[in-house]
Amino acid sequence: MNPEVSIIAPETDLLKGQQGQINIAAKAHDSDGSIVKVAFYANDMKLGEDFEAPYTFFWDELPEGTFYLMARATDDSGTSTDSTPVPVHINAKGDIAPWMSADVGQPGISGHADLRDGRLTVKGGGNIVPVFGNNKGLTEEDQAFHYVYQEVTGNAELVARLDRITETAPHNRSGLMIRNGLEPAAKEAMIGFSVRGDQYCSVFYSRDSEGAPMTQTPPIPSLNTPFYFKLTKTGDTVTGYHSRDGVDWVKVSSATFAEDSFYIGFAVDAGNENNPIEHYNSSIFSEIQLVTQ
């Protein structure tokens, strides 16, 4: 018979800084023989192995990213079994000033942001548009995502290139967002990418009053990263644009946004649906320019 093995530490969706260490522990059993070794993996990378219970490995010099930890038990007959993978998320350290960072709502996995060498990494779970498809029982108040922002008064123009978006689930999103508050279902508008199958679509989202349904433009399909987005707020109007090169801009749509004081920045979600599975979208923005007046 095949051996049995499972990871008992760390917990699912552990968040860890690169400066730390992850203690990986597994339990293994073989009903008709003995366990010879347990090997530990992060994705396809072998970390190490242990030959005696309790089976553990201390992982340091942590790389940045999301990894699926797996234990492989081998018995005295040479038969092996792999454990169910356990996701962990390792975050880099980087000062994001003058930006600030916060989870909006309850995304399931806490978001993260770091700014290094002009590249802003934003990670988040949740769902910016929770009321869609099979997400029955959810309301606009269930909106959740990670937001990196500045508080601005007057007019503003934010430009950035989206270099990467993680394909976590149908309709997960990354882009530029303006809001009148930091609570779920605030009045807001967003321009960015939505993952639709094996392609990215440019979409403009808007909510014209607090708690109202989010509306969206017809998706513009068959696009890829890197891709530029621009969000402007002039007077009472917010407008979303996109561009392949950051020079020739195409207007996607606009909405009324009369607030004089507001938040503007970067929004990332994981397209989470109404089930126990949590996802984590890691997106990268560069060539960031925010002009206010």
Image (cartoon, grey):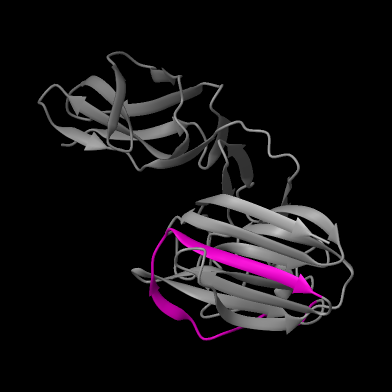
Residue drawn 44% across and 29% down? 63
Q: Which residue is nearer to you in this view: 99 or 71?
A: 99
The x, y position of residue 83, in whole percent, is 32, 38
Magenta stretch holds residue 224: yes
Residue 70 appears in view: yes
Is 54 situated left or right of 210 in this image? left
Residue 292 lies, with reference to residue 9, above or below; the image says: below
The x, y position of residue 243, in whole percent, is 50, 69
Residue drawn 76% across and 42% down? 98
Q: How many marks?
A: 0
Residue drawn 39% across and 17% down? 54
The x, y position of residue 118, in whole percent, is 57, 41
Is 88 situated left or right of 103 in this image? left
Q: Which residues are magenta?
A: 211-234
Residue drawn 77% across and 67% down? 179
User: Extreme left residue here?
Assistant: 77
Residue 1 lies, with reference to residue 229, above or below; the image says: above
The x, y position of residue 148, in whole percent, is 69, 51
Quarter that holds the N terminus:
top left
User: Extreme top residue here?
Assistant: 52
Is 94 situated left or right of 180 in this image? left
Residue 71 lies, with reference to residue 176, above or below; the image says: above
Q: Which residue is nearer to you in this view: 261 or 195?
A: 261
Quarter that holds the C terminus:
bottom right
User: Extreme front residue here?
Assistant: 247
Magenta stretch holds residue 179: no
Residue 137 appears in view: no
